[in-house]
Image (tube, rainbow, N blue to C red):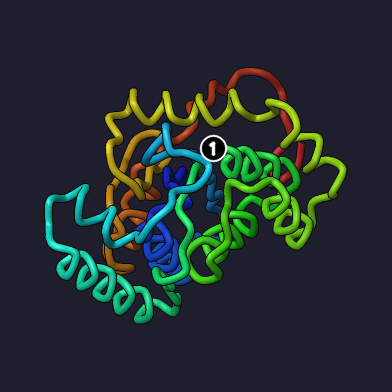
Amino acid sequence: MDVEIWSDIACPWCYIGKRRFEAALARFEHRGEVRVIWRSFELEPEAPRERAGDRAVRLAEKYAITIERAREMEQQLTGVAASEGVEFRFDIARSGATFDAHRIIHLAGEHGLQDAMKERLLRAYFTEGELVSDHQTLARMAVEVGLTEDEVSETLAGERYAEQVRDDEQTASQLGIRAVPTFVIDHALGASGAQPPDALLDLLRQGWANRSPVSVVTAGEACGIDGC
C-alpha cells in the first residue's frame, strides 16, 4: 500500500504531522507492506533564497495580527512540537526557498534514503537554524544521510529532479491539495492536516480495507502451492 505525503520543509505542521504519522504507522498491523513516498509542495514558490528580518514580524504582516499574537502562535506551536518529541527554534529559523531541497529529497529517494533526507532537512530548518536553500548546506546534510558528494553537487549544479518537483506540485493541484501535510493512500483516500495518530491509524486501516483485489482470469496450466 502506497502512502504519498505532500509537504514542505518550511511547514511546521508537516514536521509535527511526520511524527504523528510515524506513531500511527508503528501501530499499523500491515506496516511492513506500506511504502511511504514524500511528495514536493512549496508553500511559497516565489520565496527568495533567504528572507531578512524577524519571522514574527513577517507572520504578523501576513495574517494581519499583532506581533505579540504572532509570538504567542510560535510559542503554542513550539509546545505542540515538544509534545511530539520535536524541538522548534523559531528564534534562529532562517526562511527561504525550498525548491532545491525538494530536488535533493527526490535524489535521496533514488537511493532509498528519502525519509532520512526529509527528516534531516526538517530538523535543520526548525531546530538548527540552517538555511536549506544554501547549496553547501544541502550538500553537507545529504552526505550525512548517505548520498555521495559528487552526485549531490552535480544535481545542485543543474536542473536534475526539477521536473519531478513540478510534477508533484501539479499533481497536488489536480487533486485539489491546497494545504499540507496531506496524506493520500493508493490515489484513492486522503486526509489533510497533522491529524492525531489515532486518526491517521484509522486512515491507514481504511486504506488497507479498501484495497481493490487483483482480478485474475484462470485459464492455462499453472503451478500452485499444492503442486503442479
**Looking at the image, residue 46 lies above or below residue 92:** above
Residue 29 visible (yes or no): no
Q: Residues within 10 Å of mark 1 (few under 14, many from 20)?
A: many
**The residue positioned farthest toward the top in the image shown:** 219
Of the pair 117 and 203, the residue shown nearer to us: 117
User: Which structural element holds mark 1?
Assistant: helix
Residue found at the very far front of the displayed protein: 53
Q: Quadrant of residue 212?
A: top left
For this rendering, which residue is in front, 61 or 158? 61
Q: Quadrant of the C terminus?
A: top right
Q: Residue at x 25, y 55 (%)?
A: 59
The quarter of the displayed image where residue 154 is located: top right
Q: Residue at x 33, y 75 (%)?
A: 78
Going by the image, does 30 lie left or right of 32? Answer: left
The amino acid type found where label 1 is placed reads Phe
What x and y, as percent, mark residue 173? 34, 26
Compared to residue 120, the image places residue 207 above or below, namely above
- Residue 172: image x %, image y %? 38, 31
Q: Position of residue 215 (x, y in %)?
A: 48, 26
Disc 1: which residue: 99
Query: Measuring 34% from the left and 43% from the top, which residue is drawn there?
Result: 210
Q: Is residue 203 visible?
A: yes
Count all numbered tags in the image, as a single digit. Answer: 1
Residue 36 position (above or below residue 178): below
Residue 197, position as x, y percentages in the image: 33, 68
